[in-house]
Image: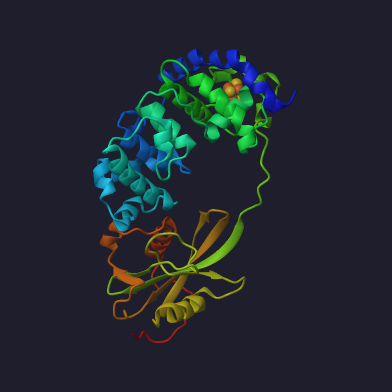
């Protein structure tokens, strides 16, 4: 019998997980801000933020976003720049605009009330099967399942099932999740599974000795639960050197709207350019500023900045400090004072580079290129 055929037969075993999971969750759950509300809009915001992002990172952004957009109507009325500025630093900016577009659709189609029905949720921009299940169960108490990375790992180990993350291998897991939530407290059961994956059934070194469902776990009984799910062969991230220009004029710093040749992903960012293997960062920045913006800048030094991960690449930032005289306002550039930066949508890579430049000793050695600053 194939692994994928085994799971549906485990219906009784799945139902037996409900009580121990609920008991454990109610005793050990973290006191997270989105667990103190049943407001579907706020829960939707948290779910959008938590995609690909750690809980600890999300907490301050969640508070800030809800302070700026306290309800669905205020978000629906916001323009791109206001939404992205409030999301700035959290990354994956498409999520923010999809959330705003979803709020607009709820206003148009449902009079501003986030629907409880799964099909209606799935019809909203940016809402997939996981998010629909989370909103329906957590906010509305519907018996709708969720399957995220944590739940996939927990089920994979509980049933010694070799989940690969493909839709075919996930189908029995969705069925198992649906079977589990049928009955009372579907929201708590979904959260219990996710919390167990986050706190106990971790990717490495699962804490089986404190797991509430250890007695029923086929992966543990087999002696090596970490075999499940099988590791996916992922190529190592590509390593890029990127020169980032912190170009100042009278206390303001130059930002640009990133084009396709800027590896960052904010709405406004520091000018940045990917470097060839031995390319000099200062020279590359000076040339880029001339070609992209017609600005001649004076380079004062370079400093090795932090690393930054984007999608499948790891960037090693080289921060180039420079000064220049602004050109008359152009569509793709703006000069911003440090105090204004919190209101502008810039990527976390740009924020890291700005922090490195601020902490670098002034006049630190580095190549100096580009001539006299000139408009
Ligand atoms: Fe995960 Fe261990 Fe619990 Fe099984 S017993 S679900 S492997 S923590």
- Quarter placement of the C terminus: bottom left
Nearer the observer, 276 or 128? 128
Residue 75 visible in the shown view: yes
The residue lying furthest to the front in this view is 109
Q: Position of residue 29 (x, y in %)?
A: 42, 24
Would you place residue 119 above or below residue 53 in this image?
above
Q: Is residue 227 left or right of residue 14?
A: right
Nearer the observer, 59 or 369? 59
Residue 154 visible in the shown view: no
Residue shown at the point (48%, 27%) measured from the top left: 145
Q: Position of residue 210 (x, y in %)?
A: 54, 19
Taking the image in four quarters, ligand 1 sits in the one at: top right
Residue shown at the point (51%, 23%) measured from the top left: 178
Would you place residue 267 above or below residue 72 in this image?
below
Q: Is residue 293 left or right of residue 334?
A: right
Q: Position of residue 40 (x, y in %)?
A: 33, 33
How many tags in the picture? 0
Nearer the observer, 315 or 311? 311
Q: Is residue 150 left or right of residue 98?
A: right
- Quarter placement of the N terminus: top right
Would you place residue 145 above or below residue 372 in this image?
above
Q: Position of residue 220 (x, y in %)?
A: 65, 21
The colour scheme applied to this rendered structure is rainbow
């Amino acid at each position: 019998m194939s692994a994928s055929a085994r799971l549906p037969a485990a219906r009784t075993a799945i139902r037996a997980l409900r009580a121990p999971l609920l008991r454990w969750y109610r005793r050990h759950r973290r006191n997270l801000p989105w667990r103190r509300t049943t407001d579907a809009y706020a829960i939707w915001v948290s779910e959008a933020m938590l995609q690909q992002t750690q809980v600890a990172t999300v907490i301050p952004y969640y508070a800030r976003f809800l302070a700026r957009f306290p309800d669905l109507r205020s978000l629906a009325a916001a323009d791109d720049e206001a939404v992205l500025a409030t999301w700035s630093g959290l990354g994956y900016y498409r999520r923010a605009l999809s959330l705003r577009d979803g709020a607009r659709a709820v206003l148009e189609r449902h009079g501003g009330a986030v629907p409880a029905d799964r099909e209606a949720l799935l019809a909203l921009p940016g809402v997939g099967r996981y998010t629909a299940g989370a909103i329906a169960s957590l906010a509305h108490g519907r018996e709708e399942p969720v399957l995220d990375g944590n739940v996939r790992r927990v089920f994979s180990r509980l049933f010694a099932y070799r989940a690969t993350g493909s839709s075919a291998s996930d189908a029995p897991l969705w069925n198992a999740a649906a079977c589990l939530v049928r009955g009372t407290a579907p929201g708590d059961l979904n959260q219990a599974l996710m919390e167990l994956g986050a706190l106990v059934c971790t990717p490495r070194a699962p804490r089986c000795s404190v797991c509430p469902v250890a007695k029923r776990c086929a992966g543990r009984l087999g002696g090596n639960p970490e075999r499940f799910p099988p590791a996916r062969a992922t190529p190592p991230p590509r390593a890029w050197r990127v020169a980032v220009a912190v170009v100042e004029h009278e206390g303001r710093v130059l930002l640009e709207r990133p084009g396709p040749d800027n590896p960052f992903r904010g709405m406004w960012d520091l000018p940045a350019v990917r470097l060839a293997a031995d390319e000099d960062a200062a020279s590359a920045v000076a040339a880029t500023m001339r070609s992209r913006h017609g600005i001649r800048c004076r380079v004062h030094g370079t400093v090795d900045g932090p690393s930054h991960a984007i999608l499948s690449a790891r960037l090693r930032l080289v921060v180039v400090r420079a000064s220049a005289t602004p050109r008359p306002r152009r569509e793709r550039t703006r000069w911003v004072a440090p105090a204004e930066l919190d209101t502008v949508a810039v990527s976390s890579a740009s924020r890291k580079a700005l922090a490195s430049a601020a902490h670098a000793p002034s006049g630190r050695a580095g190549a100096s290129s580009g001539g006299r600053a000139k408009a």
